[in-house]
Image (spheres, grey):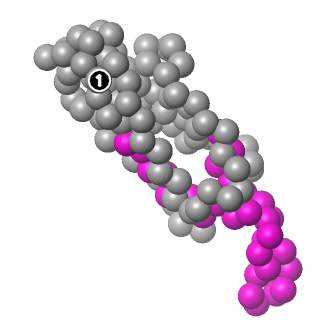
Amino acid sequence: MAKIKPRVKVPKSAEVGEVVTIKTLISHPMESGQRKDKKTGEMIPRNIVNTFSVTFNGEPVFEAAVEPAVSANPYFEFQMRVPEAGELAFKWVADDGEVYEISKTIKIA
């Protein structure tokens, strides 16, 4: 399987109260558990990113429960108002117990 890599796009700086757009993408196969392996004929086990959450300075700002119908390499985009300088922490949790995390800092302009 390819290396699972989360990517995020966050402005480096913003003014206090400014609304910014946050974009995320994680390279993940999102196996639904409903396909068969073409070589063996056996079912491929389900392995999806089942939760995605974002905090800003420890406070939740975005959360999603992900279902098997979501395509491979899930992409999320949302907006948030920047109250102060701080750190956005992104977390994806998969069925197999793997946790993928990345963080980005926003400075006040």
Give the residue at x 66% y 45%. Answer: 66
Q: Is residue 23 above or below residue 30?
A: above
Give the residue at x 77% y 60%. Answer: 46
Q: Position of residue 44 (x, y in %)?
A: 78, 71
Give the residue at x 24% y 19%. Answer: 18
Q: Which quadrant would residue 106 be assigned to in this image?
A: top left
Q: Position of residue 38 (x, y in %)?
A: 74, 88
Q: Is residue 65 above or below residue 31?
A: above
Q: Position of residue 104 (x, y in %)?
A: 35, 30
Question: Residue 6: in sight, yes or no?
Answer: no
Give the residue at x 74% y 48%. Answer: 95
Quadrant of the rendering where the C terminus is positioned: top left
**Which amino acid does the dot numbered 1 rest on?**
Val
The magenta segment: 23-51
Name the element at disc 1: strand
Judged left or right of residue 49, residue 53 is left
Q: Position of residue 69 (x, y in %)?
A: 68, 59
Q: Main structural element of the magenta stretch: helix, strand or loop? A: loop
Question: Residue 92: in sight, yes or no?
Answer: yes
**Residue situated in front as seen by the camera: 47 or 61:** 61
Q: Which residue is mark 1?
A: 19
**Residue situated in front as seen by the camera: 15 or 8:** 15
Q: Is residue 94 above or below residue 2?
A: above
Q: Which quadrant would residue 34 be assigned to in this image?
A: bottom right
Residue furthest bottom in the image: 39
Let me know if residue 25 is in the magenta part.
yes
Judged left or right of residue 21, residue 42 is right
Q: Which quadrant would residue 72 be assigned to in this image?
A: bottom right
Residue furthest right in the image: 42
Judged left or right of residue 50, residue 44 is right
Residue furthest left in the image: 109
Quadrant of the rendering where the N terminus is positioned: bottom right
